[in-house]
Image (spheres, rainbow, N blue to C red):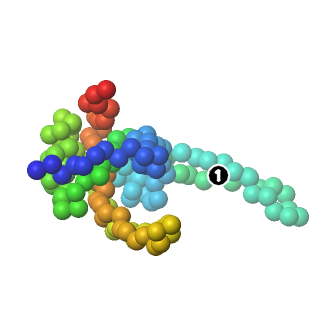
């Protein structure tokens, strides 16, 4: 049964996927997390300026580590699909390894419109969005199977 309706290629989704698909340099919050991520110790110097007092130079030790890129892609899926089914279908369809699947359910919105015929009421469909995280180094080419 096909649970994936369509890939989600909107401006908002592209921002989410591009932001998470880049490696980043982050600061560890504590020594425990520094050990966990293999953080490197860095010394930063800064100047404290106070009114009526001379400038004071200080140094601070910070632990920094690199967070690897995690490619993410969004799909509109059927509301009854669960994470396991979505994972299997994405792996089968695009021949990639899926590490994580996050889902978001959106309720149908009511809409009204005034026309010549009077008030027209309706409802937009409810849908479910799946954000799929792939194994590092893999990617999905959404546009590869489009025929013109």
Q: Could you say which is closer to the camera, residue 2 or residue 140?
A: 2
Q: Could you say which is closer to the camera, residue 144 or residue 116?
A: 116
The residue under label 1 is: 59
Q: Could you say where residue 98 lies in the image, as x and y percent from the top left?
A: 22, 44
Q: Could you say where residue 145 lies in the image, as x and y percent from the top left?
A: 26, 30
Residue at (84% x, 57% y) in the render: 54
How many residues crowd mark 1 within 10 Å: few (<14), some (14–19), many (20+)? few
Check the image and report above or below for 112 versus 88: below
The answer to whether residue 146 is visible is yes
Q: Could you say which is closer to the camera, residue 101 or residue 106?
A: 106
Q: Is residue 104 left or right of residue 21?
A: left
Position of the C terminus by quadrant = top left
Residue at (43% x, 57% y) in the render: 31
Q: Residue furthest top?
A: 148
Q: Residue furthest front?
A: 117
Label 1 secondary element: strand
Residue at (64% x, 52% y) in the render: 59
Q: Residue furthest left?
A: 1
Q: Could you say where residue 45 lies in the image, as x and y percent from the top left?
A: 66, 48
Q: How many marks can you see?
A: 1
Q: Is residue 98 left or right of residue 73?
A: left
Residue at (29% x, 52% y) in the render: 76
Q: Could you say which is closer to the camera, residue 36 or residue 3?
A: 3
Q: Is residue 97 left or right of residue 17?
A: left
Q: Could you say where residue 67 lies in the image, as x and y percent from the top left?
A: 40, 44
Check the image and report above or below for 128 versus 136: below
The answer to whether residue 70 is visible is no
């Amino acid at each position: 049964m096909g649970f994936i309706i369509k890939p989600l290629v909107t401006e908002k989704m592209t921002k989410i996927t591009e932001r998470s698909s880049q490696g980043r340099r982050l600061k560890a919050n504590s020594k425990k997390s520094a050990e966990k991520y293999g953080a490197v110790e860095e010394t930063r110097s800064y100047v404290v300026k106070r009114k009526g007092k001379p400038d004071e130079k200080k140094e601070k030790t910070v632990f920094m580590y690199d967070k690897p890129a995690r490619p993410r892609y969004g799909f509109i899926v059927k509301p009854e699909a669960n994470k396991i089914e979505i994972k299997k279908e994405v792996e089968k369809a695009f021949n990639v390894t899926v590490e994580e699947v996050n889902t978001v359910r959106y309720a149908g919105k009511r809409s009204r419109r005034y026309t010549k015929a009077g008030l027209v009421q309706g409802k937009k469909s409810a849908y479910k969005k799946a954000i799929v995280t792939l194994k590092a180094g893999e990617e999905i080419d959404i546009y590869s199977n489009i025929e013109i």
